[in-house]
């Protein structure tokens, strides 16, 4: 059973400074928070998405995921690909790849999310380990482990789930 819900930070958590956020202060169930920073997703020299009107999903023990509205995405560079997964909070996800290379998904969306997450219906989030993701001018780093799609930046402290020995969180 899940022990941490954002109500108290565990002893092993890194302590954030005044400009940082701890993933251990994020709630469970997750929260949606507006983000007005410039978010860009690139593949080489191509800008796939660019927005200042994104939504972050904040969930205990995980770096934020950043969802971009469809009007700020260049879908001519993307193709829906086979595969799906299910999130207990958001519902059934579908996956997206670069149209030029459909062998690996680079992002996901929730076409029909649960009512609590209806705001991100049809919005996309991208894996920062598979395409270049930026918040303002900072290159986002991928969350450990390869499964989760959290966006790690200098203002986020952990440790976070996904890496070795984190399965019990």
Image (cartoon, helix red, strand yellow):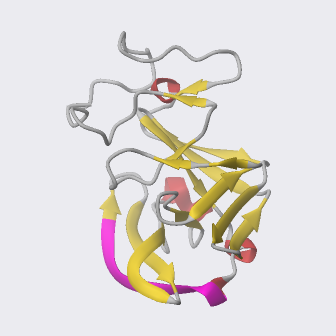
Residue at the top extreme?
A: 11
**Hey, which quadrant is residue 94 in on the image?**
bottom left
Where 108 falls versus 56 (above or below)? below
Range of residues picked out in magenta: 76-85
Q: Residue at x 70, y 56 (%)?
A: 54
42 in magenta: no
Asked if one can make out residue 39 in the rendered structure from this viewpoint, the answer is yes
Along the line of sight, the residue nearer the viewer: 29 or 24: 24
Image coordinates of residue 102 in percent, x first then y, are: 42, 86
Asked if one can make out residue 109 in the rendered structure from this viewpoint, the answer is: no
Q: Is residue 69 left or right of residue 111?
A: right
Picture quarter containing residue 74? Answer: bottom right
- Vertical placement of 68 versus 17: above or below? below
Report how many numbered discs are placed on residues in the image.
0
Q: Is residue 79 magenta?
A: yes
On screen, residue 43 versus residue 35, left or right, reads left
Residue 75 location in percent, x, y?
A: 64, 84
Residue 141: % across, % down: 53, 47
What residue appears at the point 21 percent right and 37 percent down from the top-left corner? 167
Q: Is residue 149 above or below residue 1?
A: below
Give the main secondary structure of the magenta stretch: strand
Front in this rendered view, residue 54 or 18: 18
- Going 52% across and 13% down the picture, which residue do you hit? 15
Quarter of the image with the N terminus is: top left
Identify the residue at horizontal 45%, vertical 60% (top origin).
Answer: 114
């Amino acid at each position: 059973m899940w022990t941490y819900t954002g109500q108290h930070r565990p002893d092993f958590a890194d302590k954030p400074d005044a400009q940082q956020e701890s993933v251990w202060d994020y709630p469970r169930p997750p929260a949606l928070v507006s983000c007005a920073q410039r978010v860009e997703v690139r593949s080489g020299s191509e800008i796939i998405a660019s927005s200042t009107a994104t939504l972050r999903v904040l969930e205990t023990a995980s770096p934020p995921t950043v969802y971009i509205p469809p009007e700020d995405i260049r879908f001519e560079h993307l193709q829906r690909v086979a595969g799906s997964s299910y999130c207990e909070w958001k519902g059934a996800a579908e996956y997206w790849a670069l149209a030029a290379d459909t062998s690996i998904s680079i992002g996901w969306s929730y076409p029909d999310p649960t009512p609590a997450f209806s705001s991100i219906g049809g919005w996309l989030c991208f894996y920062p380990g598979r395409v270049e993701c930026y918040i303002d001018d900072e290159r986002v780093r991928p969350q450990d482990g390869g499964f989760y799609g959290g966006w790690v930046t200098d203002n986020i402290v952990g440790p976070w789930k996904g890496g070795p020995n984190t399965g019990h969180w």
